[in-house]
Image (tube, rainbow, N blue to C red):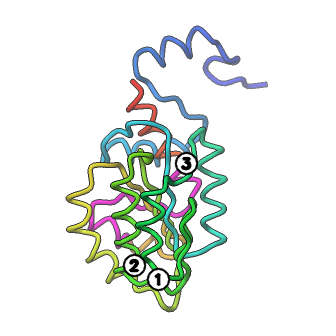
């Protein structure tokens, strides 16, 4: 049968490509998010990811996707937890579940806390379509915030990615956490080079 261009995995080829800074992907499902992330975001200083979500289930799925991409869902340190505790009634662990009724102000406060955390190298924002979350309001609020953020951030907009609302804020917007995790893996590989 057809074995592709190389047929088998060649460790020397992988080593040579890695030494040249080439990030390899296995599927088009990984390629497109990697391309988008690398063209729109700075490299990640490391593999430690903070996940901020307005849905508990999608936060857990995002954590699995980040881990499967070879990245770390880092535990928050005391200072970050204390900042997040100011968001009364919200979670303080990574992945951070702000719940479905999170306002744009609460999402921004959480993003501020994780963006300023020394233990975080990159951010995955996972938003689900919720009756109480206004994605347009959040996109408008994220535009000035994103200009001041020096860490890479990708978004998985589950249920409304086709509207590309967060792209206006300069944040690459993908449809699934797995796609965003593939993009973050590419940014971590670029940072390691």
Q: Label 3: how many residues lie within 10 Å, few (<14), some (14-19) or many (20+)?
A: some
**Cβ atoms at labels 1 and 2 below 8 Å apart:** yes
Foreground: 44 or 27?
A: 44
Residue at the extreme top of the image, as rendered: 12
Task: Give the spatial CA distance, label 3 vs label 2.
Answer: 21 Å
Q: Is residue 145 magenta?
A: no
Task: Give the spatial CA distance, label 1 vs label 2.
Answer: 6 Å
**Relative image position of residue 141 (x, y in whole percent):** 27, 76
Q: Which mark is residue 106?
A: 2
* 157 displayed left or right of 172: right
Task: Give the spatial CA distance, label 1 vs label 3.
Answer: 22 Å
Q: Is residue 171 magenta?
A: yes
Find disc 1 in the rendering and name its residue.
102
Which quadrant is the N terminus positioned in? top right
Instruction: Determine the residue positioned at 20% across, 68% down.
Output: 144
* 4 displayed left or right of 165: right
What is the quadrant of residue 149 in the picture?
A: bottom left
**Relative image position of residue 35 (x, y in whole percent):** 40, 42
Q: Say which element carries label 1.
A: loop
Q: How many marks overall?
A: 3
Find disc 3 in the rendering and name its residue.
74
Instruction: Determine the residue positioned at 56% across, 51% down.
Output: 75
What is the quadrant of residue 68 in the picture?
A: top right
């Amino acid at each position: 049968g057809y074995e592709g261009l190389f047929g088998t995995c060649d460790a020397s080829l992988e080593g040579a490509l890695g030494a040249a800074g080439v990030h390899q992907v296995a599927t088009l499902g990984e390629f497109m998010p990697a391309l988008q992330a690398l063209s729109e975001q700075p490299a990640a200083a490391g593999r430690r990811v903070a996940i901020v979500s307005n849905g508990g289930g999608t936060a857990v799925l995002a954590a699995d996707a980040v881990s499967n991409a070879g990245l770390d869902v880092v535990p928050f340190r005391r200072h970050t937890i204390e900042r997040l505790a100011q968001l009364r009634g919200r979670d303080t662990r990574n992945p951070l579940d702000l719940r479905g009724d999170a306002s744009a102000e609460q999402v921004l406060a959480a993003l501020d806390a994780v963006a300023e955390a020394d233990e975080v190298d990159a951010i995955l924002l996972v938003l689900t379509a919720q009756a109480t979350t206004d994605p347009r309001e959040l996109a408008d609020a994220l535009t000035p915030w994103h200009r001041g953020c020096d860490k890479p951030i990708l978004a998985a907009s589950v249920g409304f990615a086709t509207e590309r609302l967060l792209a206006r804020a300069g944040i690459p917007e993908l449809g699934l956490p797995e796609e965003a995790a593939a993009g973050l893996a590419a940014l971590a590989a670029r940072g390691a080079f």
